[in-house]
Amino acid sequence: MSLRKETVDPDLGPDISPAPTPGPPVPLLHVVAVALVDGDGRVLLQQRPPGKSLAGLWEFPGGKIDAGETPEAALVRELEEELGIATHASCLAPAAFASEPLDGKHLVMLLYVCRKWTGVPQARHATALQWLRPAQMYGVAMPKADLPLIGLLDALL
Ligand SMILES: Nc1nc2c([nH]c(=O)n2[C@@H]2O[C@H](COP(=O)(O)OP(=O)(O)OP(=O)(O)O)[C@@H](O)[C@H]2O)c(=O)[nH]1
């Protein structure tokens, strides 16, 4: 027996979303990432290195949030580790998020925008770096979770 109440909102119409299916809980993978924006409105992408999952794809710098870490602290740490640049939590503006199944888990990725940092980004972990305007990202090979973020950045920046 379905416990769902069948309602028809006159403005929204019937709720046609599938009933939630009971199943094992899905582990969430909490990730932070950033659109670093330069003075010309271009955003930094880095290429995932061979040997890592999704190798060869272009992504926003960032990584997993460690246990006990705030998202902002994780991003400041990742930017130092991956690119050798320094920024502050106060320079990270929440912008968008991605939610996508990934390798048996469910990725929840918080995307920030940052326009202020010190140092010149270096590819310490990535194969390569490139600066692109959001409109130029539509043809770039990026992780599936990132694709809805391109249009959002295009509208935002
Ligand atoms: N940084 C980043 N990760 C992304 C993006 N899109 C996306 O699906 N991911 C996924 O989010 C996860 C981030 O993990 P990661 O492996 O980069 O994290 P990490 O730097 O902590 O690496 P490590 O655990 O190997 O040390 C990966 O599964 C990656 O594929 C993105 O735009 N940026």
Image (cartoon, grey):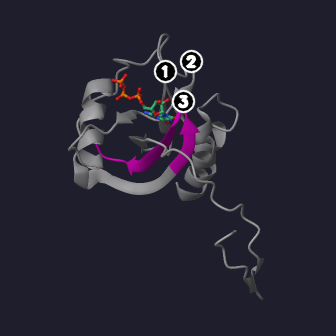
User: Which residue position holds label 1?
Assistant: 48
Q: Which disc number belongs to residue 125?
A: none
Residue 69 found in image quarter:
top left
Answer above or below: position of 150 versus 156: above
Task: Farthest residue to the bottom: give it.
Answer: 10
Nearer the camera: disc 2 or disc 3: 3
Residue 121 found in image quarter:
top left
Q: Which disc number belongs to residue 56?
A: 2
Structural distance between the alpha carbons of marks 1 and 3: 16 Å
Q: Given contact means CB atoms under 8 Å apart, are the residues at marks 1 and 3 in contact?
A: no
User: Which residue position holds label 3?
Assistant: 103
The front one of 63 and 59 is: 63
* Label 2 secondary element: loop
Residue 138 part of the magenta segment: no
Q: Residue type at mark 2?
A: Gly
Q: Given contact means CB atoms under 8 Å apart, are the residues at marks 2 and 3 in contact?
A: no
Q: Residue at x 45, y 45 (%)?
A: 109
Q: Residue type at mark 3?
A: Asp
Magenta span: 98-117
N-terminal label among 1 and 3: 1
